Image (cartoon, grey):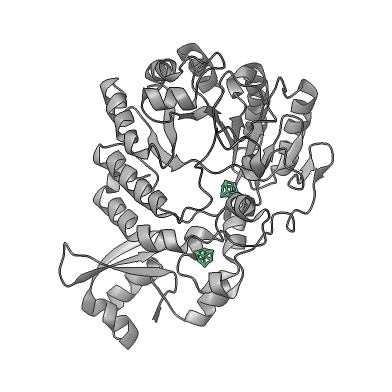
Amino acid sequence: MKLSRYIKIFPFEKKPGYVLLYSTGKASAALVKEETRDSIGKGTLSPENKATLLKLGMIVPDGETEKREAAGFMDRINSKNSGLNISVILNLDCNFDCIYCYEDGMKGRLYMSDETAGLLTAFIKKKFRPGKRSLNIDFYGGEPLLSTGLIKSVSAEMKSFAQSRGASYTFTLVTNGSLFKRKIAEDLVSMGLKGVKITIDGPPEIHNACRPFKSGAGSFDTIIKNINETCDIVNVAVGGNYRESNFEKFPLLMDHLEREGLTPERIYELKFDPVMKRAGGDRPAADYTDGIMTVNEPWVIRAGTALREQILKRGYMTPKITPSPCQVEITDSFVVNFDGVIYKCPVFIGRDGFSIGDLKNGVRDYSAAYNLGIWKNEKCVECEYLPLCFGGCRYMSYVRDGGMDNVDCKRAYLDAALEYLVKQDIQYARKTI
Ligand code: SF4
Ligand code: SF4
C-alpha cells in the first residue's frame, strides 16, 4: 500500500502527535497519528487502519496504476452522472446596469422566442438518454424573471416529460432578485423551482454603485425585502462579487443581513467570489479596473479565506471544498443562449469560436474549441491538486492568454489556501454543504 498521490498532509497543532490527511480526490479528511502515517510507507499498517484509509482514498494498492487511471477521472465522473443540466439564457434584457456585467455589449431587448423554446424542449428530450434520473434547468438572463411566461411553459412541459420517464425535474434561477416577489416564488415553487441565486455585492453603498437599476437608483433594499418575503419557501443562495478595493467591507453586508433578519437559518448558502476580468477590452478600463485574471494573486487568497471564515463563524452555510471540474468537461451540461446557439459555459456566450452548435442542428465536436482534457499532461496528472483543479477555469486562460492552449494553474492558490480551507471545513463541519 502507498499513499495516494492525490493527498495532502497538514500539521494539526491542536492535537500534538497527529497529522491531518486530506484526499483531494474524495474530499475526505482523517486525523491520524504520526506513527500511523509512517507505517504506510513501511507497510506495517494495521488491518483496520488500512481498510479505513483505503475507503477514504488516502492509500492505494499501487501508485503507478493510480497515475495511469487518473487520465480516466473525467470519464468516470461523466459515466456516473445520472443527471442532465441545461443552463438557459432566456433573454439578454435586464432592469439593472451592473458595472461588470459580462454580457455588456450584447444586451438589449433580445428574448427567446416561443419557436426557440420549442426547439429547446425537443433538444432536452433528445439529450435525456435512457437511464437519466434527474433533469435540472438553470434559468439565466439578462434577468430571467423578465421571461416568467417562458419559465412556466418550459417547466410545465419538462416536468411532465421527466415524470413520464420516472425522473425528477427541478429548476433554479440566477436572478438579480429585484422581481422575485412572494407570489411569483409560490407559483414557481409549485412548478419545480428548487432554489434561486441572488447577487449582493457588498453593503448598500457598494452594492448600489455596482448593481444599480437602469434608472441609476439603488437596488439593495428591494432585494433584501424580496429575500425576506421568499426565503422561507425556497432556498435562497446569496452570492457576492468583491474586488481588491472593497472585499474588506463585505463583513458589513453580513451585519446588514443579520440586522434585516436574514439569519443563517434562513439563507441557504452564502458565498463570495472575486470579480473576473472581462475578456477583450469590451468596456473602458475606467469602469472596470481590477477584475482578476488568476486566483493565485495574494490578495485573492487573503480575501477568499478571510471572508469564508467570517461566513462560517457567523453560522452561515457555504460550499465545502470538493473536486470541481470546469463545466466544460462535463458531458451532460449545456448552455443555450436565447437565440438557440449552444455553448459550454455562460461566460462564453456570443464569443466567436465558442459556440458548440445550435438547437436546430445539434451539438458538434467541441473538444478542440474548448481544449478538453487539457489536464491530461504529466505535470497535472502528477499534481496532488488535480481533482480540485482539472486544469482550472477555461475562461481565465482565455482572458489571460487570449486562448485555451494553457492550463489555468491554481497551484499557488492551493498551496497557500487549501490547508486553511480544509481546517475550516473541519472546524465548521455542519456549516459546509
Ligand atoms: S470556464 Fe470557468 S467559469 Fe466557465 S464553467 Fe469552466 S470554470 Fe466555470
Ligand atoms: S493546472 Fe496546476 S494546480 Fe491544476 S492540476 Fe495542473 S499542475 Fe496542478
Q: In which quarter of the image is residue 281?
A: top right
Front one among 29 and 242: 242
Residue 209: image x %, image y %? 46, 24
Q: In which quarter of the image is residue 10?
A: bottom left
Residue 264: image x %, image y %? 30, 31
Front one among 286 and 226: 286
Instruction: Decide if residue 286 is in sight here.
Output: yes
Front one among 385 and 97: 97
Quarter of the picture holding the N terminus: bottom left
How many badges with numbers are in the image? Answer: 0
Extreme-front residue of the structure:
286
* Residue under the image location 57 percent in, 76 percent down: 68
Quarter of the picture holding the C terminus: top left
Extreme-right residue of the structure:
361
Front one among 381 and 282: 282
Q: In this view, does 71 lie above or below 224?
A: below
